[in-house]
């Protein structure tokens, strides 16, 4: 079957314009300016995604007393021995090169010490103060400089273009391109490419409280599942302890105030005004995100909540001038919501922040599907069971840059335009258009139900009973969505239609999270099973690997290869261990 649709050809197609997508575009262009490179993005280039929202900063071992080995061990131990060690090593070692590039080639200004060295602040879960930052709005600095460089080069842009399906070639053995929707008109567009980078940035926006930008709905992971790719560590969803509670009718609720507040000594209080973190970890508020979020959730379950249903963070025992200077952005954000961060109490709740899981990939960003590469939050395996604050933007810029280094060579050696499977395009168009043929309904109750069920049953604490309940509930919700129509009279910026597709992807990826969470019968990092509360058998660590074939999920538990260090060992020389 043939549809009338726009068709475009480009050598390299990059999906997403966060740190991963923009770095990939710049590096690929540097390596071979004769290639046509196109960045396609659901929003506007430089204005969407989560890299722009990075507050705290970027982890990198720069200080004399710090080391790559120490950063590596923090990453592995924080990730509870589940990270792929070669990917984690690449992260910590290439981060040094990348931060220099950001400063010296792209012109980012990071905060400095009086002696001229880069200032590095404390982030929770790390044994060294290694987080490079620009005040508390680091991401804006990084994305603005990257976007300027992309604009200044001959890199093509498809803005407000939403990728909907990865399309294989006719033989099915390699990628042909990506089906998209031009959101401005509603028109379908097929972009044929020799190589594609998936960098749509995951984003656990299926939870009641969540931090990522509104354009992120796990589209990349959903497309990867439908394309038959393997997703690992999907049960590992990170909750950030301090999401704002700013009322039910504002999207500010769930967005975070940054971790550095706890790093410099901020206190968490329950509804009765008492500190409580000492009950859960000797590091108090500076424990890793999983532990702090769980402690908070426990207090909430026991009913020690504020009138708004959450808990509090306070800085009022610290030097007000320091708080105002170091956390200017956070002070202003809180003031916008009616809170006084310097001398008052701010209502907070744990909020779904980051997916450690994602598409299985190699250190050169290649995947199981020839021609498809992945980088950033869409990928899995770098962080294991927990991501350290500051390792997220390092991940997207390190691996985005690597993808950009690898893609031109790959295109020269193996690339080819290969005609798409037209039936697959037709099926994907039909799937997207399905709600337009039905009477329009209301998507809000479906979204609210998804938020609640993921928060209650597949959230910070899970067990077999809650995960079992969620299985039926997700199936029912999908059936309800499939029966709900959308008014398709005007497809230009038809946000209800896009919301329908967003929910379709979120439900699919939620199912993979639930499925992996059911399979992992121990507790590690972000995954806590109240029926299997212990961290077990680190020496025989296995990671989950989900695939989906003909609508059915399958799971494999694969052994982690301890290629550099085993549990109980360290790479840090004894004389540096203190
Ligand atoms: C509020 C907040 C604060 C954070 N603070 C820190 C921090 O201090 N330190 C740290 O290390 N990490 C932090 N993170 C995490 C960090 O932002 C991410 O790990 C990282 O930036 C992800 O980069 P990315 O390039 O993979 O994705 P993103 O930067 O999210 O970019 C994804 C891109 O894909 C596009 N896209 C999505 N779907 C589609 C589609 N279907 N078709 C086309 N395009 C699509 C989006 O529009 C966007 O352009 C923070 C995250 C948030 C939300």
Image (cartoon, rainbow, N blue to C red):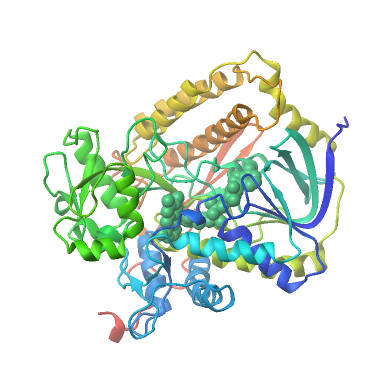
The residue drawn where x is 71% and y is 17% is 437
The one of 290 and 26 positioned closer to us in this rendering: 26
Res. 574 image quadrant: bottom left
The residue drawn where x is 73% and y is 68% is 29
The one of 223 and 316 positioned closer to us in this rendering: 316
Query: What percent of the width, then of the height, locates residue 479?
Result: 56, 20
Whether residue 230 is visible, yes or no, is: no
Query: What percent of the width, then of the height, locates residue 503?
Result: 55, 31
Res. 128 image quadrant: bottom left
| Relative height, residue 182 to residue 74 (above, below) | above
| Relative height, residue 315 to residue 42 (above, below) | below
The one of 232 and 423 positioned closer to us in this rendering: 423
Query: What percent of the width, then of the height, locates residue 523?
Result: 33, 48
| Relative height, residue 446 to residue 79 (above, below) | above
Furthest residue toward top: 439
Q: Give the quarter of the figure containing the C terminus.
A: bottom left
Query: What percent of the width, then of the height, locates residue 432?
Result: 69, 29
The one of 229 and 446 positioned closer to us in this rendering: 446
Res. 215 image quadrant: top right
């Amino acid at each position: 079957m043939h549809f009338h649709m726009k068709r475009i050809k480009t050598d390299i197609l990059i999906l997403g314009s966060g740190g991963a997508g923009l770095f990939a575009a710049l590096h690929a262009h540097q390596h071979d300016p004769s290639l046509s490179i196109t960045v396609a993005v659901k929003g506007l280039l430089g204005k969407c995604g989560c890299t722009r929202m990075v507050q705290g900063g970027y982890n990198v071992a720069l200080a004399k007393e710090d080391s790559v080995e120490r950063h590596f061990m923090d990453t592995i131990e924080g990730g509870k021995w589940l990270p792929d060690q070669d990917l984690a090593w690449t992260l910590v070692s290439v981060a040094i090169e990348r931060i220099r590039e950001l400063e010296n080639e792209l012109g980012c200004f990071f905060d400095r010490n009086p002696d001229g060295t880069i200032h590095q602040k404390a982030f929770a879960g790390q044994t060294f103060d290694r987080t490079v930052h620009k005040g508390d709005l680091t991401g804006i600095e990084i994305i603005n400089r990257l976007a300027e460089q992309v604009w200044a080069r001959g890199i093509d842009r498809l803005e407000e273009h939403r990728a909907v399906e990865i399309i294989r070639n006719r033989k099915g053995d390699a990628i042909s391109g990506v089906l998209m929707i031009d959101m401005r008109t509603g028109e379908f567009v097929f972009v044929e490419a020799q190589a594609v980078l998936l960098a749509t940035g995951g984003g656990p926006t299926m939870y009641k409280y969540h931090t990522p930008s509104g354009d992120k709905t796990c589209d990349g992971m959903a497309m990867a599942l439908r394309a038959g790719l393997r997703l690992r560590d999907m049960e590992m969803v990170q909750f950030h302890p301090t999401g704002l509670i700013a009322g039910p009718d504002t999207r500010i609720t769930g967005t975070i105030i940054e971790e550095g507040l706890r790093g410099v000594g901020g206190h968490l209080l329950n509804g009765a005004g008492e500190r409580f973190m000492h009950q859960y970890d000797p590091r108090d508020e500076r424990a890793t995100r999983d532990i702090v979020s769980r402690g908070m959730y426990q207090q909430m379950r026991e009913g020690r909540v504020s009138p708004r249903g959450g808990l509090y963070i306070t800085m009022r025992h610290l030097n007000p001038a320091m708080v105002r200077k170091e956390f200017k952005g956070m002070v202003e954000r809180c003031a916008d919501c009616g809170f006084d961060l310097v001398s008052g109490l701010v209502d907070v709740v744990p909020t779904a922040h980051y997916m450690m899981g994602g598409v299985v990939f190699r250190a050169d960003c290649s995947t199981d599907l020839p021609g498809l590469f992945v980088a950033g939050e869409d990928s899995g395996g770098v962080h294991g069971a927990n991501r350290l604050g500051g390792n997220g933007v390092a991940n997207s810029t390190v691996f985005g840059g690597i993808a950009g280094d690898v893609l031109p060579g790959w295109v020269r050696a193996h690339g080819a335009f290969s005609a798409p499977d037209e039936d697959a395009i037709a099926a994907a168009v039909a799937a997207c258009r399905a709600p337009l043929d039905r009477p329009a309904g209301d998507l809000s109750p479906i979204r609210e139900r998804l938020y609640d069920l993921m928060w209650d049953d597949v959230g910070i604490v899970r067990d077999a009973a809650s995960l079992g309940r969620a299985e039926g509930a997700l199936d029912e919700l999908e059936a309800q969505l499939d029966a709900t129509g959308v008014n398709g009279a005007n497809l230009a910026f038809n946000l209800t239609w896009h919301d329908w597709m967003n929910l379709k992807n979120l439900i699919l990826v939620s199912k993979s999270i639930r499925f992996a969470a059911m399979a992992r019968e121990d507790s590690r990092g972000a995954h806590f099973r109240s029926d299997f509360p212990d961290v077990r058998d680190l020496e025989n660590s296995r990671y989950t690997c989900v695939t989906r074939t003909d609508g059915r999920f399958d799971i494999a538990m694969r052994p982690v290869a301890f290629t550099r260090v085993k549990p109980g060992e360290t790479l840090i020389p004894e004389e540096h261990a203190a």
